[in-house]
Image (cartoon, grey):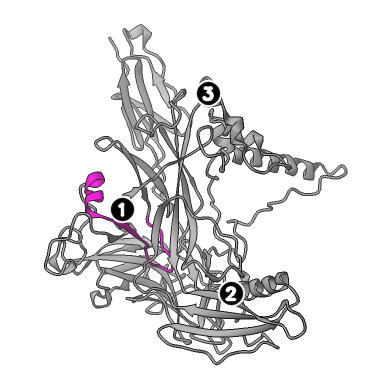
């Protein structure tokens, strides 16, 4: 921050110097002081963005794999052959409370873990939990709806998922663990 | 006169005042983590209230139990019904065709930013002496209850007689402290235990303890909630004291809210707008909650397992165990209760495996024996960081996460 005393006459006008993180430009029309744009948020894995047609996500990994939307990684194809995909969201799955979820959906192998052939996709659902042994769900975004339209998105996942494991219980449904 | 002309460029702003012109960078639009708790003061009601930034548990936002009147007082409105676009809970469907009473309890999702009432309790000089004053506030002029000084190893109870005269002449410049807990309450299933004794065959002492364990399903009408007030601490279990029943919920602290008085405030006074709010957070990230499932104790060899009685969400089994003494019975009963407790587990998907620190850092100072200057320097840094933490309420980013409980990976219950 630079503090200048108000000049009372030309001889007393102080010389302006740029402080830390600022840029001073001088020209015939005067001087301009600029600063780097402030941080707008915390850029994290699986950050969701509502668009007019659905939800886009920043890059995030489940173990070593990036979830896909329509066969394209959520951050777009690495070779640039496909842009960042949009997860279509459907008002028909929205709950009575006006909520829906964007989730990572994994299909584990017979051992209950992921391998390079495992299907890892993003899905839009009305219930973010799964008791199906063949389908693990992990909520990424809570989407709020009003009058049949999404109006807000709340991030429910901030980090990459280092490990997935399905645990078969002695009684009751299986347990899908994302950690 | 050739006045200096400077215009604010990108990311900068200019503020003029009687002492000159200040040019500075714009304030950052800071990201607010989940569960961030803020305190507000309503000048009309002279009451403090809290708001909690939306966090999720298994992707779902918790509820706040409140009344429409309470929300109107602090905010006027707490959002629109997402289905109708009208004010929340104003539609007749929520009241069976009648108006919802302003005092009727309703559950409002946290993402509508409802205000939470805060019930302050005194800690420190005019408190009950049970809770000590954090070092952070002692540095700001708060003192512990003088009765705490009467607690010794030989006399663990507070000597109230030693308080005589302490409150008539409080130290000059003393500041008072009030506290309110904010926590998550997850409803769950519970077990209850009832232990009865049958006469032994050899002696007159009880030698056969019959422990009846019952399972009670979770109340489906109870939602995940955010609570305020005095968070109950874990109660000691006396497994032989008749019917013991677990708490029907799991609690997890979100934050501790504090109000710090101006110096020389009147002892026992109610906080007003002149008090300074502080919040110490315990949660920063979305959570996963894994309930524990009820299972019959097939591993208890030697126990008599009665035929399970299942109905209306209640299961039951009975264990007969030969015991040599009351203490033996208590230990055996407590072991069964602990082993079959239905307390769930919390964790954060942190990408950090089982560590709760993001990224993983050494929490313990290295061995500083010998002449390892690097180790000594590291130890000094850790000591300085620990001292810094004692002087602040919240840690610096990156924040800690709730560690993953590794026992979840084993298929037990």
On whether disc 3 and disc 1 are found on a single subunit, the reply is yes
Q: Quadrant of the N terminus of chain B?
A: top left
* Mark closest to the chain's N terminus, 3 or 1: 1
Categorize mark 1 by other alpha carbons within 10 Å: few (<14), some (14-19), many (20+).
Answer: some
Q: Is residue B184 left or right of residue A162?
A: left
- Which chain letter matches label 1? B
* Residue A120 picture location, percent across and down: 46, 79
Check whether the beta carbons of the residues at disc 3 and disc 1 lie within 8 A of each other. Answer: no
The answer to whether residue A28 is magenta is no
Q: CA distance from mark 2 to mark 3?
A: 52 Å
Tell which of B384 and B301 is nearer to you.
B301
Q: Which residues are magenta?
A: B54-75
Q: Residue, x 53% and y 32% (percent of image)? A: B125
Q: Is residue B331 left or right of residue B65?
A: right
Residue B113 is tagged as 1
* Residue A175 picture location, percent across and down: 51, 80
Residue identifier under label 3: B170
């Amino acid at each position: 921050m630079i503090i200048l005393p108000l000049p009372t006459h030309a001889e007393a006008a102080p010389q302006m110097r740029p402080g830390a993180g600022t840029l001073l430009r001088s020209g015939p029309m005067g001087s301009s002081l600029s600063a780097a744009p402030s941080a707008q948020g915390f850029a994290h894995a699986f950050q969701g963005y509502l668009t007019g047609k659905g939800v886009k996500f920043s890059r995030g990994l489940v173990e070593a794999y990036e979830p896909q939307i329509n066969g394209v990684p959520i951050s777009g194809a690495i070779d640039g052959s496909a842009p960042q995909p949009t997860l279509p969201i459907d008002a028909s799955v929205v709950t009575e409370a006006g909520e829906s979820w964007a989730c990572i959906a994994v299909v584990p192998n017979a051992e209950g873990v992921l391998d390079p052939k495992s299907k890892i996709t993003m899905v839009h659902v009305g219930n973010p939990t799964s008791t199906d042994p063949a389908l693990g769900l992990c909520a990424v975004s809570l989407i709020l709806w009003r009058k049949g339209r999404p109006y807000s998105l709340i991030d429910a996942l901030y980090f990459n998922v280092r490990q997935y494991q399905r645990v078969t219980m002695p009684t009751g449904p299986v347990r899908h663990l994302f950690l | 006169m050739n006045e200096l002309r400077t215009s604010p460029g990108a990311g900068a702003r200019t503020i003029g005042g009687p002492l000159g012109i200040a040019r500075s960078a714009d304030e950052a639009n800071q990201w607010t983590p989940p569960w961030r708790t803020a305190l507000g003061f309503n000048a009309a009601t002279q009451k403090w209230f809290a708001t909690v930034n939306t966090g999720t548990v298994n992707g779902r936002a918790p509820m706040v139990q409140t009344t429409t009147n309470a929300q109107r007082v602090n905010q006027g409105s707490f959002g629109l019904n997402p289905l109708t676009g009208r004010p929340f809970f104003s539609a007749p469907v929520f009241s069976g065709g009648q108006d919802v009473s302003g005092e009727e309890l309703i559950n409002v999702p946290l993402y509508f930013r409802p205000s939470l009432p805060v019930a302050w309790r005194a800690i420190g000089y005019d408190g009950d002496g049970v809770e000590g004053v954090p070092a952070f506030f002692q540095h700001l002029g708060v003192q512990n209850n003088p009765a705490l000084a009467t607690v010794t190893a030989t006399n663990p109870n507070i000597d109230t007689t030693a308080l005589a005269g302490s409150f008539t002449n409080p130290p000059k410049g003393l500041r008072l402290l009030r506290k309110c807990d904010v926590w998550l309450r997850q409803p769950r299933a519970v077990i209850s235990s009832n232990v009865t004794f049958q006469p032994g065959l050899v002696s007159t002492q009880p030698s056969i303890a019959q422990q009846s364990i019952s399972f009670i399903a979770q109340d489906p009408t109870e939602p995940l909630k955010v609570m305020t007030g005095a968070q109950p601490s874990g109660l000691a279990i006396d497994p032989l004291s008749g019917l013991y029943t677990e708490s029907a919920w799991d609690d997890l602290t979100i934050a501790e809210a504090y109000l710090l008085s101006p110096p020389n405030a009147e002892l026992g006074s109610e906080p007003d707008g002149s008090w300074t709010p502080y919040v110490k957070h315990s949660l920063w990230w979305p959570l996963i909650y894994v309930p524990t499932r009820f299972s019959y104790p097939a591993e208890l060899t030697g126990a008599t397992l009665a035929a399970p009685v299942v109905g209306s969400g209640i299961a039951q089994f009975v264990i007969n165990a030969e015991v040599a003494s009351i203490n033996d019975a208590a230990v055996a009963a407590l072991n069964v209760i602990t082993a079959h407790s239905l307390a769930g587990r919390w964790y954060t998907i942190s990408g950090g495996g089982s560590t709760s620190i993001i990224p993983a850092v050494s929490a313990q100072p290295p061995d500083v024996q010998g002449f390892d200057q690097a180790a000594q320097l590291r130890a000094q840094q850790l000591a300085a960081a620990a001292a810094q933490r004692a002087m602040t309420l919240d840690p610096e980013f990156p924040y800690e996460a709730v560690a993953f409980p590794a026992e979840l990976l084993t298929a037990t219950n």
